[in-house]
Image (cartoon, coloured by chain):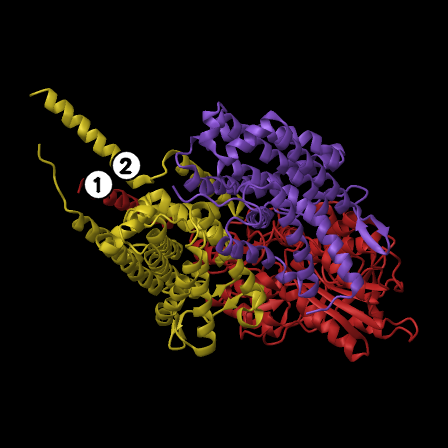
Amino acid sequence: MTKLRIPASVWIAGLLAILVVYPFITNSQYQQHIMVMTLMAAITASSWNIIGGYTGYTSLGHAAFFGLGGYLVAWTHNHYGWHPFISAWFLAILVAVFACAMGWVALRTQGSAFVVVTIAGVFILRLLALNLSDITNGARGLTQPRPGWGGVPWSPELIKIPFHYIMLVLLCLTIFVSWRIRQSKFGMGLIAIREDEGKAESVGIDTMMYKVLAFGISSYFVAVAGGIYSYFFTFIDPSFVFGIFTSVTMVLMAILGGRGTLWGPVLGAFIMQPLSDWIIGEFGGTQIHLTVFGGILLLVMLFMPNGILPTLTEFLDRRTKARKASADSNPA
Amino acid sequence: MTIPSFHLFVQTLILGVLVGGVYALMASGLTLIFGVMRVINVAHGAFLILGAYITYVLFQNFQIDPIASILITIPIFFVIGWLLQRYMLSRIANPEQTSVLVTFALALVMEGLLGIIFQTTARSVTPSYTSAALMFATYRFPVTRLMGFGIALLIILLLYLILQYTNLGRAIRATTQDPRAAQLMGINTSMISAFTFALGVATAAAGGALLSIIYSFNPSSQSDWIARTLSIIVLGGLGSIPGALIAALILGVMEQMTAIVVTLYWSPIVFYFFLFITLIIRPQGLMGEIIREKG
Amino acid sequence: MKSNVLKLMIRLAIVSLLITACGGATATQAPAATEAPAVTEAPVAATEAPAEAPIRIGASLPLTGDFSDPGTAAERGYQLWADVVNQSGGLLGRQVELVIYDNASNPDTAVADYERLITQDKVDLVVGPFSSKLVIPTSEVAAKYGYAFPEPAGGAEHVFDRGLTNIFFCQPAPSSEQSIPFAQFILGLPEDSRPKTFAVITGDDPFSISVVDSTAKLLTDGGLTMVLREVYPADTKDFSSLAAKVADLNPDLIVGGTQFEDSVGQIKAYQQAGYQPRGAMFTTGPSLPKEFDEALGTATEGVFAPISWFEESTIETNPEFVQAYHAMYGSDPIAEDSANAFTVGQVLQQAVENTQSLDNAVLIDEMHKATFTTVVGPLSFDDVGRPKGSFMVLQWQNGKIVIVGPDYAKQADPIWPKPNW
């Protein structure tokens, strides 16, 4: 039987088209705000996926890069007047270099120990941000001038729109890089490391360099997102950006959607971020939020550790096979 | 930087040792669990806080002394730990990889639930002896910390005796050293795992009770405590209780010293610093064995 | 390929859901912001049901978390004000409706709350949260959308030095001037009983730091020596090492920059460390009449704090406020923060009534120009929103708060030195 086969590329194009015109479809500022946050979530989750999904090293420390990006952008904006939409891309490179250095040290450990090291990393950065208050303004955080261009602030009605587009561009870039990595020898190497690091090493892969590179790349997009975020909110302080919860959110989204897949993290973000905003809206302070996130992570890890996409795919494949098998055994 | 006077130095040393004992109790359960199950129970901090809250409830509503309430909370936590291991943790396909995330998720759920029930206002348990201190040679020994130290050592000693001199303890140690060999010897390792996890969580009941009289706490404190206890067990050597004791004393003293010499703000860094350094330079810590490679 | 198709179908479904959600949401939102105020109508009598939509005023308060005690006190103040206004006919003939969110003392949540209040809930007006820490970032949000931002508790310098003109700090004096009466008392003591040394121990909070640093300056200018200045993380719970350090130096006077929890924490730690200063002042904490007493019992005796308001004051509108408060909330003593929140309401109300307008730009202008009659006295603001007035100092005596200075507000003489806690 023939099924209507719409190539994936058409679907992607369709989705992209919707996202491109999204700010004009919705007339609610708040919905625009949520979409910007959702795109950002998708970026960070997909970026994390490079080290956490492809390479199999669960980092709970990516909030560090998010925060670093945010602080660098805020600081240079306040001191040199660099506009975040431009500076973020470059400052994130600095963060990636830092990540490589940190990775070179941290990636010597494995499994649970690695997770613990990354947690410690975030805590240390938070402590530094709080204490070096001459630079970071400590607990008070850094504020930035109102978003605008050339000294002219954008009007309140239109203010979300530039952020929407820059996040969309960043997301496309992140997915593109993630896709290319997956197709490449580098990506195969990462997956080999994930499956059996010892064997990968013995086959001649320089596992340390691969891991460090993956760690650095995975930090870049997160850092850009962090920089744009600090501008979006015109405010950044240590407790949110250098918080474990921020890290966990990225990880949860990637895992929920399907860690190690290309689109899984994006799916996870599109589910979790609107849900998260809805919870905060309905229930205010953070407690129910924590319970729900923790609960979802728990359920996913226990019952669907591969995430939605792989599980769904497997389910459908099995059904097709079953149907095919029964079709074969029952000639028409 | 302040150079402390001799008196202040010794006083700080005393405070550090006393608090180190309590830290050791808190860390002992965590290291025990890792030793047998190779699982880092990131929810341990949340269990400590849960213990603190239950102690608080018993004290506020029934006027039960926090130290006495340990007798009530230990069995309860033992059962909770047992159930958790048997019916949740044992289902995890790949424990060494995924247990951190699972227990982390558990910690979040607990923190959230505690926040919903108790709100985020800081609490502490204040029995009549809260502000009292014993004087000895011009040095002050706060009663709450003294009692905490005493109880902590007692429980750690008890734990140690169980591990060294009972059949159960021997079985636990055998499983720690080599699970496969232990199984071949006829030890029911899944039962041992459940028991050990339950034991580890039960120590959190005691640790939490002591926490509640020495510090104030709210649901989000759990992340401070897990950071501290993780650093302690890593420095001490994963799986080693004596190691945890030594590490706890060292870190307790260093934490207090940093608070005095530098400033309170920098004192948490002592824990993270040692955690990082130990994992990088000497992953087996002071007294542990080499961590097995990722499977 | 099939799995790809599936993936994208799911994502498309989600995006469509988002779109329909937003379409539905915008359809149900009441267009409150665009209503013209009823300028020419006479105020509706209390017994008639008002025909117009209510005026919605939004706020995000720390109802849980580190600032929960003063935060809930502020909420009571706002609610009381709204009630009082509604019972006397409303504002411009319309009922007032408060939309309050809990930010759990978290600045990021507070920022998100005000974004939501202004862009999603489309409230007509907003009032500020408790504490400089929350006021600083949230005032930026209000400024972005041109909203006036009268607030009950953000008086640190950094609130005012960012070039914003929409903020109005509704207490009698900014943080840097709040401890002047206290410093004057200390410096006015006779030579032989005056303290020589003091220590500043403060949480890392812009408000506390502002108050204690300005106190320190006044005291050192007056000849005292500061032997220690320490800043601790705002959520510190364990003060034992800090107390040991202070006890070792044994300053005559302790100046603490605190919220409520840490003021209690510090005092308990000092008790344990055996440190008995001749005098003690804390910035918040002692100003909470019920909670401070419950937490410390007799240890409160002799503790000072700067205060903007007191219950027995006979300033115009205050007796009515006190009476209304007790009618609504019972006989517990009133916290200063409730009075500050009520003051915000008064300022907002008078600005609206003076101009007969809900236009934020008009209100901002009026708030800069006028003098307002409030429970903390006549209040007026400079061009960045600093109030022009002066504070008072309280002391705990016999388990109660009494005002001990300046002379014009004095209820009793101050006790010196402080009895052992």
Could you say which quadrant of the image residue C182 lies in?
bottom right
Q: Specify few, some or many for label 2: CA neighbours under 10 Å numbering under 14, 14-19, or 20 or more.
A: some
Q: Residue at x 43, y 37 (%)?
A: B95
Residue kind at label 1, given as amino acid type: Ser
Q: Residue at x 67, y 67 (%)?
A: C209
Position of the C terminus of chain C, as image quadrant, is bottom right
Question: Toward the viewer: B98 or B234?
Answer: B234
- Say if residue B63 shows up in the picture: yes
Residue kind at label 2, given as amino acid type: Leu
Chain identifier of the residue bearing label 1 in the image = C
Chain C: its colour in the image is red
Is label 1 in a helix, a strand or a loop?
Answer: helix
Q: Left or right? Give the position of C93 relative to A321.
A: right
Q: Which residue is mark 2?
A: A312
Is C377 located above or below residue C322 in the figure? below
Chain identifier of the residue bearing label 2 in the image = A
Position of the N terminus of chain C, as image quadrant, is top left
Q: Do discs 2 and 1 belong to a common subunit?
A: no
Could you say which quadrant of the image residue C190 lies in?
bottom right
For marks 2 and 1, give the CA distance.
8 Å
Q: Which residue is mark 1?
A: C3
Is B112 located above or below residue A319 in the figure? below
> Given contact means CB atoms under 8 Å apart, are the residues at marks 2 and 1 in contact?
yes
Question: Toward the viewer: B139 or A3?
Answer: B139
Q: Left or right? Give the position of C60 relative to B184.
A: right
Q: Specify few, some or many for label 1: CA neighbours under 10 Å numbering under 14, 14-19, or 20 or more.
A: some
Expressed as whole percent of the image width and height from the top left, the position of residue A328 reads 10, 24
Expressed as whole percent of the image width and height from the top left, the position of residue A198 reads 33, 47
Chain A: its colour in the image is yellow
